[in-house]
Image (cartoon, helix red, strand yellow):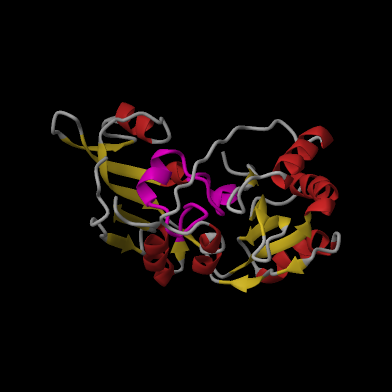
Amino acid sequence: MIDLSLMKSVRVDPQGKTVRAEAGVTWGEFDRETQVFGLATTGGLVSTTGIAGLTLGGGLGWLMGNYGLACDNLISVDVVTADGQLLTASKSRNEDLFWGLRGGGGNFGIATSFEFQLHPVEPMLGGILIHRLDKAAEAMKFYDDFTRTSPDELGSFVGFVTSPEGERVMAIFVAYNGAVGEGQRILKPLREFGPPLADMIGPMPYVQVQRMMDDALPAGRQNYWKSNFLKGLDTQAVNVIIDYVAKAPSPHSGVAIEQFSGAQ
């Protein structure tokens, strides 16, 4: 394990809409600097996540419907190879290495800094809807149908979690990357269905959207994750998920269902 956490430089080029950030930067630190200029790129769901690991693994995020994954916005990477070479990988330099670094999953060297394409990102409509677990099957069916026709500007996912009161619930997290008024119109059917136990959706800056999951995933917790792809959310699949959530051994256990759509 190579600890690069002290490498914190972030340099934004607002005219060229690019940024160069070192490998020790977290997404919260990255967003703080780029949002000064009203810019951002796809980057995670928790602000304490490091930019390096997420980008090298592909990189999900709220903006992926519009702009693709974090690795799709990667312009170049500075790398130290096992034999001590200092290389820059991009579409025009060390192209095979660049291909491998963009989600290839292998250990191709130590990535020390990353150059990203940025995009204009204004305050968004974002937040959380909460449904009781005994209503989750109906809510999940509605959510599945709703997201099949939702625009690329809407990022969303479902989390089966334990509320602060100790109750197992279904939470729908949303962030609309566009005009707040249009987001209100688009999200109205989702917000009215049920109705939900709680509706915590409202206008917020992108840096706040990026912190929506922070309290549920505090730094230092020894999390263990497993993931897979679902071809569909049929009734049997949803019921199996709900059954296992109800029997989860820890209040920190949960299931996330992430929506993939838009930019490829």
Image quadrant where one finds the C terminus: top right
Q: Position of residue 83 (x, y in %)?
A: 14, 28
Most extreme residue toward the front is: 249
Instruction: Name which residue lies at 45% across and 46% down.
Output: 70
Residue 194, compared with residue 2, is above or below; it is: below
Q: Main secondary structure of the magenta part?
A: loop
Query: Is 213 placed left or right of 171 in the picture?
Result: left
Res. 26 image quadrant: bottom left
Q: Position of residue 99 (x, y in %)?
A: 37, 30
Query: Is 147 placed left or right of 33 in the picture?
Result: right
Most extreme residue toward the left is: 84
Query: Is 14 placed left or right of 135 in the picture?
Result: left
Task: Tell which of 76 and 45 is nearer to you.
Answer: 45
Image quadrant where one finds the N terminus: top left
Task: Tell which of 245 and 247 is nearer to you.
Answer: 247
Q: Position of residue 192 (x, y in %)?
A: 84, 64
Task: Tell which of 185 and 170 is nearer to you.
Answer: 170
Verify whether residue 23 appears in magenta.
no
Res. 255 image quadrant: top right
Residue 263, compared with residue 134, is above or below; it is: above
Instruction: Name which residue lies at 79% across and 65% down.
Output: 197
Q: Position of residue 242 (x, y in %)?
A: 75, 43
The magenta stretch spans which residues?
40-69
Instruction: Name which residue lies at 52% across and 46% down.
Output: 60
Verify whether residue 47 appears in magenta.
yes
